[in-house]
Amino acid sequence: MSQNKPYYLPLHLRPALEASLTCTAYRLLMVVEQEATRTGTALYLVGGPVRDLILSRRSKDLDLVVEGNASELALKVAPQMAGAITVFSKFGTATIKVGRTRLDLVTARSETYSQPGALPRVKPSTIHEDLNRRDFTINSIAIGLSKSSFGQLLDPTGGINDLKLGHIRALHPQSFRDDATRMLRAIRYEQRLSFHIEPKTLRCIGKSLEENMLSTISPDRLRNEVDLMLREDHPVKTLLRAGELGVLSGIFKPLTTAHWISRLSQYDKNYGLLSYLAALTYPLSAEEGETFIARINMVKRWAKAVRDINYLKQIEQSLAHPDLSDASLFQLLNGRSNSSAAALASLTQNTLVRDRLVKYLGHLRYVKPLLQGKDLLAIGVPQGPKVGQILQKLRTARLEKRIKTRKEETQLARRHLRSAEN
């Protein structure tokens, strides 16, 4: 698209934006637009919201670029938004969150990378330079929102044509050397939009993997990218594609193609993030699991899911024992990650193990005595560990179907109390 002859979107842009954005996002957009108009600041909608608008997809978050000081503009509008604001002065950016909606306000900038994987050095620039420093052509489109340029469409890299073709295209051959996390982003966009990474970009990804560029990325940044993959609407497809292209093994070699995770697609379930993570690490040994935990600096609940899927894998034979009682099943699984148990229920080849895991998750884990700690104190159980011990015995008796009523629980609790006293 020629920059000498600007193209303007039709006059119905505003209702189109309102239809494309959530109510909160559109309200925030109007507040920022009004303040930018009042101060004469050049304001542009960029990236994902523009892409989604063109594709008639719904957007929750906003990416806005100003030719000016984004932090100052954000601080002026924040009081009107009743949201939390975070300013990153070093990068000329600000983030405003209202509920689950996120607004990123960025100073138009250019970037240089001192070395692969390093955070960029930035300096203020124009909207055209800003669009040319982005990751993919489909994210390098902008719409003017200022009074003088309202509706003007900027597409210096051919992003609209790639949207028509369904292509994910990197802006330049060094893109994945500058920031190797773009490999994971390319896969996310490809699977989310049902697009294809175009051949030249695929070759660039392959070359960057050969050069081990993912090793240049910090553990925290890698964990964030893995988190984003696991939060996609169809994470199994995303993970399988990452395995197919060698990106997963580039993050951690033993993950290989992750072909085993396809078993989750056989079950019509809405798994949580931790279940997908547990499934991804299912074949890893305990030692490999610990290495992967360190590789991406996992938070505690992530690490627990990884360790527990390994534990559950080791006790599969016990879970398959024909004489395993409900009480024993509960003891084996209690305290372990339910997300890991859900993952194993889909990954195991043993139908008995699967049935027992489903029974535990759907029923047994919720079994508890009718009596509470205060009830035991009232019948003379001394305050302290004895209360918890008797409650545990009552739960076991319920699981074994030896008691059903509150009266039977009270009688059993009294017997345990007398036994302890003698």
Image: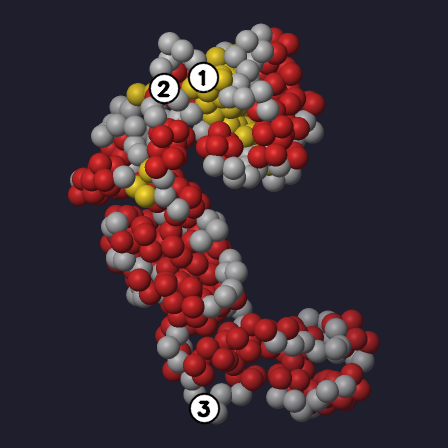
Q: Residue type at mark 2?
A: Met
Would you call the spot at circle 3 few (<14 residues within 10 Å), some (14-19), or many (20 or more)? few
C-beta proximity under 8 Å, tags 2 and 1:
yes
For label 3, the residue is: 322
Q: CA distance from mark 1 to mark 3?
A: 72 Å
Q: Residue furthest right?
A: 378
State left or right for residue 419 relative to residue 4.
right
Q: Is residue 4 above or below residue 102?
A: above
The mark closer to the camera, 1 or 3, is 1
For label 1, the residue is: 7
Dividing the picture into quadrants, the one containing residue 180 is top left
State left or right for residue 54 relative to residue 183.
right
For label 2, the residue is: 1
The mark closer to the camera, 3 or 2, is 2
Q: Earlier in the sequence, mark 2 or mark 1?
A: 2
Q: Earlier in the sequence, mark 1 or mark 3?
A: 1
Q: CA distance from mark 3 to mark 2?
A: 69 Å
Would you call the spot at circle 2 few (<14 residues within 10 Å), some (14-19), or many (20 or more)? some
Q: Residue type at mark 1?
A: Tyr
Instruction: Give the x, y percent position of residue 411.
Output: 77, 89
Residue shown at 42% from the left, 44% from the top: 193
State left or right for residue 149 relative to residue 236.
right
Name the quarter where the N terminus is drawn.
top left
Residue shown at 70% from the left, 89% from the top: 403
SS class, disc 2: loop
Q: Earlier in the sequence, mark 3 or mark 2?
A: 2
Front in this rendered view, residue 52 or 418: 52
